[in-house]
Image (cartoon, helix red, strand yellow):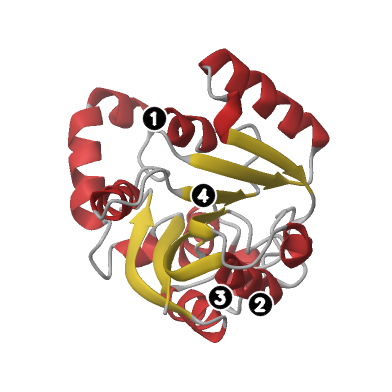
Amino acid sequence: MLRRELDRATGAGRRPLQVVDVGGGTGGFAVPLARDGHDVTVVDASPDALAALTRRAAEAGVSDRIRAVQGDADSLSELLEPGQADLVLCHSVLEVVDQPAEVAAAVATTLRPGGAASVLVANRAAAVLARAMAGQFDLALSGIDGAPGGRDTVLRRYDVESATALLAKAGLIVDEVHGVRVVADLVPGGVAEREHEGLVAFELAAAGRAPYRDIATQLHLLARRA
């Protein structure tokens, strides 16, 4: 989904794209994007992660296309100028910040009109099912109402409706929703290794289709600033 958005944007003659990766850490997305010729700003709270990003960018020969900014996602609006990005990546962030609505609003403000946000969130249904299958029924029951419980490091989880509503409130229009790891985290390791190609084919076929996407470990939303 993200690759199609990049192809669409660059096909319109807007290259290089200005990309912001919120919580981008060591550059798992930033460095490949920079290799493709895009300019990427990575915002992350960890100085160690940003140091690793700087080394990784240097090794890849793309230091001139990557800028590291230390700061929390909650402070995004104070760290970046509004309307500067063609694309904002916000992956595995909204479930761990204190004020997800404010972060979503800052993501929207950072985008240029027509710019896209790639948002990845933890899925509530997947956590509930995983705990129930593990016999942790009390935690599974609490998770149905949205409370992570146990040793969970996230503050909240989402479903398609709540994630879409959060982005809509921020002024973002959701174009597509896909599931990430629909069954990959449930399949026994030996089966996944032996039937890898079949697993990938199933994941690709099921990712965009309800109800299968709705039990995926994560939900990936592509949204656009009007």
Which comes before the other along the chain, label 4 or label 1? Answer: 4
Which comes before the other along the chain, label 3 or label 4? Answer: 4
Foreground label between 4 and 1: 4
Q: Is residue 164 left or right of residue 106?
A: left
- Report the Cα–Cα distance between label 1 and label 3: 27 Å
Q: Position of residue 115 (x, y in %)?
A: 43, 65
Amino acid type, mark 3: Ile
Q: Secondary structure at mark 2?
A: helix
- Report the Cα–Cα distance between label 2 and label 4: 21 Å
The residue labelled by disc 2 is 101
The label number, if any, that marks residue 19 in the structure image: 4
The label number, if any, that marks residue 189 in the structure image: 1
**Residue 127 appearing in the image:** yes
Which is nearer the eye, 172 or 38? 38
Amino acid type, mark 4: Val
Q: Secondary structure at mark 1?
A: helix
Residue 210 lies, with reference to residue 130, above or below; the image says below
Which comes before the other along the chain, label 1 or label 3? Answer: 3
Q: Secondary structure at mark 3?
A: helix
